[in-house]
Image: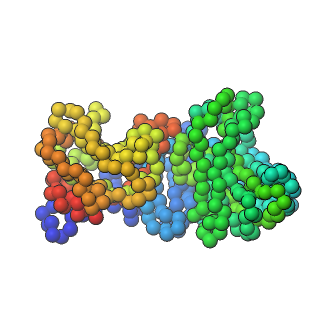
Amino acid sequence: MTIQQNYPNSRPSLNLNFGTSTKLDPIVTFSRPEIEDEVNGATQINRSGAIEIVPVDTARFDHDPATLEPRGLLVEKGSTNQLRNNIMQGAAIGSPGTAPTYWNFDTSVGGISRTIVGVGQEDGINYFDVRFTGTSTGNPNTYFAFYPEEVNHIPATASSIFTFSSYVKMIAGSVPANSSFILVFLVRDSGNNNLGQYQTFTVPLNDTTSKRLIENRYSLTNTPFTGSVAYMSPYYQWNVANGSSVDVTLRIGLPQCESGSVMSSIILSTGTQDGTRATETVSIEGDNFSKWYNPSEGSILWRGTIDSLPISGSRIFEIYDSSGTERMAISVENNGLMYMRVRKTNETTQTYNLGTVSLGSEYKIGLGVDGSSLCLAVNDEIKTTINDSFALSPADRLILTDLKDLGENRKFTTRHTGLSYYPSRLPNEILRTLTK
């Protein structure tokens, strides 16, 4: 992300390429600390397309599980997987076989039986294979449910938001007519009574067969429930129509249940304890900042993807001072809109609407500003040009994906592939060219 040869007089004073890196430049400060009495379950998808655990205070450089292309520096809010045994500890092959520890899994329901026919690991995903056979005697359906956690383990209220995710692949057989396999949330009261409220997602099993397991991760996020909710209970369920015969084998791997409306990267539990990933911070501060930043004028170029929306606003990047006053930033709001924010000389913040975010799409954003003008370009298009008075100083740090003020449910995921800074206000057309 540098200026092309026909602009030889402009050179970046900062040029970070996260897209092909496996470690951070020394000027970047990164933190994902160890949490006392918690298990570090942070992971990434490596260049071989496998899930691997990443040590504390180590940056994660993620890869696409299908193409193996690098996806850049992954930055996420902290989260806890409240399923204690997503690594399938205790599962054993047999007839009917043994379900993993803490799992609740009947051996036969409504004419349909299950057997554990495989246990193992694929691309870093701990899994078990379960075969369902028989003819449904349920009216109108047989509802064969199995739970990856005890039903009173996850405390909740009616307004709680959780996301349940899992790898699922059909490895043998076919889906019976008028039948489905679903992810489910139900809620219970303090007496562990089922409140009769369900929310579901249908797993497209026929789409899973030709892909690797790591390409088949599905999720369900609930909307608020009502009543005296005390526990949230995620589970899997077969709905098999009365009279339909079934002979299907499913591979189930690394389920996750976490607070918030975002399916985050895999968090490994231990088999006996929830797993946690601490909040990550990425910054350039002090002398490492001042040696490339021009307090009078400058242009910043960012490249990356936005993979999930926050429940309220969060910054993709921001330059600000020690008092917390931002000088320039690009933010994303919970309504799906992206905004540019720049400080004016009268110490008010000018905000500009950049349109609706396209989740998962690559963005190239260029912002050039000096004391009297501003230009913003996004993906080869000049979004706005403004003549006004702007204040770029004082400033002493840059933050990537500002998560510091996000509450428990306010998750936000970005992948950064590049960041450059030019100590001059680049001409508008050059900014546009750089965002091609």
Which of the pair 255/399 is nearer the observer?
A: 255
Numbered-mark total: 0
Q: Residue at the location (70% across, 48% down)?
A: 235
Q: Is residue 370 left or right of residue 186?
A: left
Which of the pair 431/149 is nearer the observer?
A: 431
The answer to whether residue 62 is visible is: yes
Q: Residue at the location (12% across, 63% down)?
A: 9
Quarter holding the N terminus is bottom left
Quarter holding the C terminus is bottom left
Return the x and y of residue 6 as percentages of the image width and height: 15, 69
Above or below, 208 relative to 336: below
Kindly indicate the quadrant of the structure image that contains residue 286.
top left
Q: Residue at the location (23% across, 60% down)?
A: 432
Return the x and y of residue 63 as percentages of the image width and height: 48, 63
Q: Residue at the location (28% across, 32% down)?
A: 323
Kindly indicate the quadrant of the structure image that contains residue 365.
bottom left
Return the x and y of residue 295 as percentages of the image width and height: 17, 44
Which of the pair 314/225 is nearer the observer?
A: 225
Q: Is residue 319 left or right of residue 79?
A: left
Q: Is residue 282 left or right of residue 381?
A: right
Return the x and y of residue 112 as percentages of the image width and height: 84, 57
Q: Is residue 354 left or right of residue 371?
A: right
